[in-house]
Amino acid sequence: MGFFDPVAGFGVTFKTMFRKTFTIDYPNGERRTAPRFHGRHQLNRWPDGLEKCVGCELCAWACPADAIYVEGAQNTDEERFSPGERYGRVYQINYLRCILCGLCIEACPTRALTMTNEFELADDSRDSLIYEKDRLLAPLLPGMTAPPHDRELGEDEQAYFLGLPETGAPDPRAPESPLADDRAGDISGANAKKINQGYKHQRKLRKQAAESGGQ
């Protein structure tokens, strides 16, 4: 070790001493994550509310921790949950096994499965860490209808997935729907779920739930 090596090390220390400091108040307050943070999974919907998942099980095959379990089923004319032939009847993610690597996202052919920025997944029960389909499905945005229902953006699969007409004019297939001008859906009136608020927020929610349950 040379004579000036310690000086170089202390130089880094002195250099950072005069920088502006910042403090993260988590878990007492909210914690913001990077935009592409790998957090809790979400099963997405099409603009009319139908589910994007087709029950192909590719995400389960890609998972290195064997944390995903999927059972596909056939859509019928009476009960349609997705635009195609099949949908995910059973969908489970075991967060006791999941390593949040994102390989399942890469394997999904319909972008049905994505990852949110929510990381507060800890719980005191093993059962509560096995997320079922109802906890993974994306919330219904304004203009969406909860399935089962018929396709609202096209008579068949080809028309449904083609999107807007070739002329670029607004989609006339649902003139009274907010989706007529925007197939992505209208999110102006949607209330986003608050995430990563810290343990004080979680205690407040539990207290409110206990009070409402006792009434």
Image (tube, grey):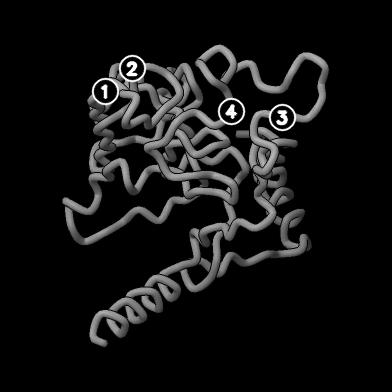
Disc with the residue nearer the chain's start (1 vs 2): 2
Viewed as shown, does residue 179 lie left or right of 140?
right
Give the CA separation, mark 1 to mark 2. Answer: 7 Å
Q: Nearer the viewer, mark 1 or mark 3?
A: 3
Under circle 2, the secondary element is loop
Which residue, given by chain and number where applicable, does mark 3 sit on? Answer: 172
**Vertical placement of 132 versus 157: above or below?**
below
Q: Amino acid at mark 3?
A: Pro
Q: Which mark is residue 62?
A: none
Question: What percent of the width, then of the height, locates residue 111?
Answer: 50, 25
Disc with the residue nearer the chain's start (2 vs 4): 2
Disc with the residue nearer the chain's start (4 vs 3): 4
CB under 8 Å between callouts 1 and 2?
yes
Under circle 4, the secondary element is loop
Task: Residue 73: name its quadrant.
Answer: top left
Which residue, given by chain and number where applicable, does mark 2 sit on? Answer: 56
Q: Nearer the viewer, mark 4 or mark 3?
A: 3
Q: Amino acid at mark 2?
A: Cys
Which residue, given by chain and number where applicable, does mark 4 sit on? Answer: 153
Under circle 1, the secondary element is strand
